[in-house]
Amino acid sequence: MKYFIISSNNRRFNYRTISIVVFAALISGIISGAFIALTWDLPQVRSLESFRPAGVTRIYSADGILLSELYLEKREPVPLKAIPYYLKAALVATEDRNFYKHSGVDIRGILRAIIKDIMAGEYVEGASTITQQVAKTFFLTPKKSLLRKIKEAILSFQLERRYTKDEIMELYVNQIYFGSGAYGVESASKLYFGKSAKDLNLTECALIAGLPKSPSRFSPLINLNAAQKRRNIVLKQMLATGIISEAEHNASAGNPVILFNHQQSRVIAPYFIEYVKNYLEEVLGASRLYREGLTVHTTLLSNLQNAAEESSANGIAEIAKRMKKRGIINPDPQCALISIDIKTGGIVAMTGGNDFSKSSFNRATMALRQPGSAFKPFIYALAVERGFTQHSLLLDAPVVFKGGKIGEDWIPQNYSGSYEGEITLRKALAISENIPAIRLTEILGPSYVAQFAHRLGIETFLDPNLSLALGTSGVTLMDLSSAYAVFPNMGKYIRPFCVTEVEDHRGNIIWRTKPQKRIVMSGEGAAIMTNMLEAVINEGTGTAARVLNRSVAGKTGTTNDHKDAFFIGFSPSVLAGVWVGRDMPASLGKGETGAKAALPIWIDFMSKALANKQGEAFNVPEGVVIVNIDPATGLPASPESKVVATALYKKGTEPNHP
């Protein structure tokens, strides 16, 4: 057996070796632990491969006009090849001169920044490379700290291993903030210069390249002088790095900054756009609407919208002049107009007030106003459905209705203050007499009138009493207009809608409207009501509309003290409703009736809407006959009749010669 004798020297050697190993393991453990602590929550850079920035949702009119863009961050990603050379070179010259040399972190730049920070006693220079800025923008918070800088460096090394320099540059130019709400060079280019990035010239490239250093400070929309000085600094850096010649520098540095004038691009249909946004937030959700870069196709027709805005503005200007002459202080009348495609139910034009920038309240869809006599067609329509004819007679004479308490009798009057005696339904509606409408409501039953109006499309509460005949219950212009569309649409109600379909960012249709339709009255009754509303134009309060020389029908509406003025009317294909009033209900002035205040706006709009629609005629269904009548008596016309009109009747109910 052999024995090994361990000397004291060997023993010391082993102890030293073991100590070194233990110490090395401890240090390695500390370093590993620190590395794990720093990196355990770091995101995987491979996630960039599936990253898609929040897109821009675009809203288009039915004729392809871009109406609006919705976004959380205004960003329009473009490939690097679409970025001009001067812009890429300027960004490298100003943000990271060694971008194509370093492996993610510029050590010399960091040391230089540390020295400046120590001398200043605060963070004054970041020394972040373009790769580090990408890492920070995509994965980290902007808060400055040593820990964040270390994580930023680690992520930068990972990015450089996984992606090429050009891929990193493409991420950078599409993601970085350029001030005034613009993310990415394409959005910045359109915001500041009204053109795509590929069309930027040298001076424009230099200005945009100077923005990432301090976007809020150097935005030309905030401080034009500072933006120009910063641009010239960038041009000097481009000269110093050999990107441009001295001649190019001198020619560019003296140029003024010429920005795109956004005021020249008028916002089309702001009330309609807001209506669409609110609707889509309900059906799709706000997150999808503002993040997924959708394409929204609406029902709006830009030519009709322009006509609506122009007609409304012209009409309100005239009313304001008349109010001023009458000495009405604070000349503030508002106008709302809505136009609907009768066959489809699509909203083709909408104005909700005079100035969206001052008030976004949509008076076409949100305001509850008394419709006055514009409510009367629903009473007469129910009567026709119940068997009344155009020549049925009503008594137009003073009347007193007993109230619930002594001394509360209701004594309604006609607007004119005069009475016709016995009067036909056709004439009573045409000249808008109040008493016959009230008597008819009493005969039919106020609650049945309210139910019938709801069936035709009025969704607001209607107080079921006799004053309903005078339009005393508030309705929206939208409801009132869509209910009128039942008449030319042969008894069919179609709920108005604003969006036809929505596409995702790949062009796939993800949502399509399903028009809500229902039959609410007979086709014969609807055709007769259309004919009676034609009489309003030809024989009654709407005669000014005869200037259109088209087949049109409609009804005026005026409330007490001329607080509200309405005209709702239609051709065989297009319906338009107009309301004029003041936000805080007050008189527009004596004589500002529906015929005087609202009808001229309607005529102006319809003259443009029907410009290319000659020869249209209202449908006459089977089961209805056409009779030439004397509108004064409602009887068949005779050689002695001074005026002859065509009237529709259900077969078997037409009048006979006396």
Image (cartoon, rainbow, N blue to C red):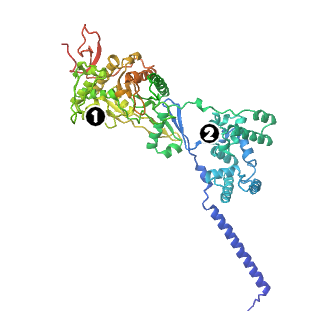
Label 2 sits on residue: 187
In the image shown, does 588 or 166 lie closer to the viewer?
588
Residue, far right = 246
In the image shown, does 456 or 614 lie closer to the viewer?
456
Helix, strand or loop status at disc 1: helix
Residue, far top = 639
Residue, far bottom = 1
Helix, strand or loop status at disc 2: helix
Quarter-wise, where is residue 123 in the image?
bottom right
Residue 624 visible at all: no
Residue at left 42%, top 37%? Answer: 513
Quadrant location, the C terminus = top left
Residue 238 versus residue 541 in the image, above or below: below
Residue 353 versus residue 607 in the image, above or below: below
Q: List x then y, in percent, for residue 463.
A: 29, 36
Q: Which mark is residue 450?
A: 1
Circle nearer the N terminus (1, 2): 2
Q: List x then y, in percent, for residue 97.
A: 75, 47
In the image shown, does 414 or 306 lie closer to the viewer?
414
User: How would you rate the neighbour count of disc 2 (Cα within 10 Å): few for under 14, some for 14-19, many for 20 or more?
Assistant: many
Label 2 is placed on what type of residue?
Answer: Ser
Quarter-wise, where is residue 459 in the image?
top left
Residue 309 visible at all: yes
In the image shown, does 380 or 96 lie closer to the viewer?
380
Quadrant location, the N terminus = bottom right
Quarter-wise, where is residue 187 in the image?
top right
